[in-house]
Image (tube, helix red, strand yellow):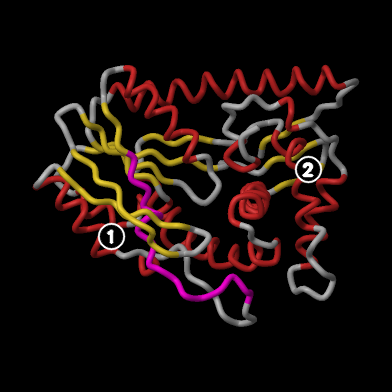
Amino acid sequence: MKHINISFKNEEDKKSFVQECEKNFHNYLKEISDTVVGKNTDIVLLSGPTCSGKTTLANKIIHDFTKKGKDVKVISIDDFFMERNDSRTVEEGKKIDYDSIEALDFQLLKCCIGDLYKNGEIDVPIYDFVSQKRVGFNHYKIEKDTVVLFEGIQAVYPEITALFEGYDYIGIFTNVEEDVCVNGVHFSRDDIRLSRRIVRDRKFRGASADFSLYLWETVRENEDKNIYPNKNICKIQMNSFLDYELFVIKKYIIEVLSDVEPSSRFYPKAFEMCEKYKSLDEISFDYVPGNSLYTEFLGKK
């Protein structure tokens, strides 16, 4: 467990704390990216559970490959989701599957990877999360200096890694790796990611806290079944936790969770999380730089 024991005298203390955390994380991220780029591979599989910082790591890898003259094509496995007709209404007793292999148009993904190797050209679907429908395709041409980065929680699923057998690729896994105790208050690694997801889903997908908490049950089941048992196929593993993040997300998570009614079956969990966050100092999101990993969850400024 990671222990953070800190008090802030003023706003300058808080700003300095964020800057120091960002500096340390930037150096850590650079080490990981340098290792990936140094492998000179043409295929990168980037995985991790929901809200684990995959986008930030992907952007850093893309930037560093580009500096070496590589053309990086990013394929989000989420774009291979099956189209859905169900609404975002929570239905008691009915779970919505967003994370298992059955949630993907696996045959289309298989065909795309096959075309990648055989023809050097692929059509990748574009999935709209709001309408939950496929809205078009991107056409990619693979050249000699092209690196293809497959990004998504599903990148470590055995069914998907099997599609890359016989090819030289590197796997990367990112996650919040340990529980955290802040000034004596315990936050589990799962609750840290859950906080990120609740705030992100409200901001970017218009989801209620009830809906996010409802989906979390299936999300965690899938992680234990399909993600964590397979994460060791990835030779590189990254811890995405930022020491300042619980202080920054405090304002936003309490705001979103306040919509959970006492009659909801998720109210006890929402209340428990709110009480923990209320015990923390608040740090303004204004102190977080615009290129921070944390903008994945709170948005660009």
Front-lying residue, 188 or 41: 41
* Amino acid at the residue labelled 1: Glu
The segment highlighted magenta reads 74-90
State the residue lying farthest toward the bottom. 93
At 59% from the left and 56% from the top, the residue drawn is 205
Taking the spot 55% from the left edge, 47% from the top edge, the residue there is: 51
Q: Residues within 10 Å of mark 2 (few under 14, many from 20)?
A: many
Amino acid at circle 2: Lys
Disc with the residue nearer the chain's start (1 vs 2)? 1
Above or below — where is 43 with respect to 89?
A: above
Quarter of the rendering containing residue 215: bottom right
How many labels, in total? 2
Q: Percent x, y for residue 134?
A: 38, 61
**Residue placed under numbered mark 2 in the picture:** 250
Q: Residue at x 52, y 42 (%)?
A: 175
Q: Is residue 152 above or below residue 207?
A: above
Q: CA distance from mark 1 to mark 2?
A: 38 Å
| Picture quarter with the C terminus | top right
Numbered disc in front, either 1 or 2: 2
Q: Which residue is mark 1?
A: 159
